[in-house]
Image (cartoon, rainbow, N blue to C red):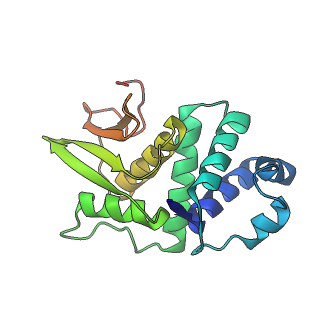
Amino acid sequence: MMRVKGIAFLGLVSFVSERFEQPVLVDVFEGLVDHPEIFLRSLEPFGWYPWELFGQAFEVVMKELGSGDPLFAREIGAHIFGLYHRTYPEDLIRAPGSSLVATINRLWLIYHDQGSVAVIEEGEDFVLKLMCPVQLTRSYLEGVAGWIESLLALWKMEGYGIFTTDDPTEIRIIKMASGSSVSDLSACS
């Protein structure tokens, strides 16, 4: 079964702890692990953790703290990306010859031990198809969209909108009319 790297867990934990009080963080993990305080102190950035545990924690945060708001999920995704980027600032920098396809797949494998992302170019637009052995939730897909927004901002790819679709494995990167931003969710759904 798919696993999630500790850096993603640490990003989720730091997002919650920066936004809310410590007891809220412990409450998120209550019922998911036997001793939440010990589990939280023992997280290792390079350790691998069961997808099921991370997915459940992500969904608890979304439901209890974010009221299911897709923008909240994107903020979590952006925070997780930001933690990785602050830890390894040179790793995802756009260099001559860098491939968006390769970088998005690399980003996926930084956080997960299985799966890949197929990137289909449609003119100036891109369709990302996430292929992994687990069913992703809509909330988690929005979190992944938050990583992608952050990557495009880092690469200074301005004028793109990131959209999820009814397909639980698909994210679209669409070139927007001038004046639109990467995180403009109102343009299409």
Left or right relative to 93: residue 17 = right
> How many numbered tags mark residues here?
0
Q: Nearer the viewer, residue 150 or 165?
A: 165
Left or right relative to 40: residue 48 = left
Residue 112 on image: x %, y %: 47, 62
Residue 137 on image: x %, y %: 51, 39
**Depicted 142 relative to depicted 114: above or below:** above
The residue sitting at the left extreme is 123
Q: Residue at x 48, y 74 (%)?
A: 88
Residue 60 on image: x %, y %: 69, 41
The residue sitting at the front extreme is 1
Q: Residue at x 50, y 35 (%)?
A: 138
Q: Residue at x 73, y 36 (%)?
A: 64
Q: Residue at x 60, y 72 (%)?
A: 45
Q: Nearer the viewer, residue 128 or 83?
A: 128
Q: In the picture, which quadrant includes the C terminus?
A: top left
Q: Nearer the viewer, residue 40 or 103?
A: 40
Residue 52 on image: x %, y %: 60, 52
In which image quadrant can residue 151 be found?
bottom left
**Depicted 4 relative to depicted 150: above or below:** below
**Depicted 4 relative to depicted 66: above or below:** below
Q: Nearer the viewer, residue 182 or 46?
A: 46
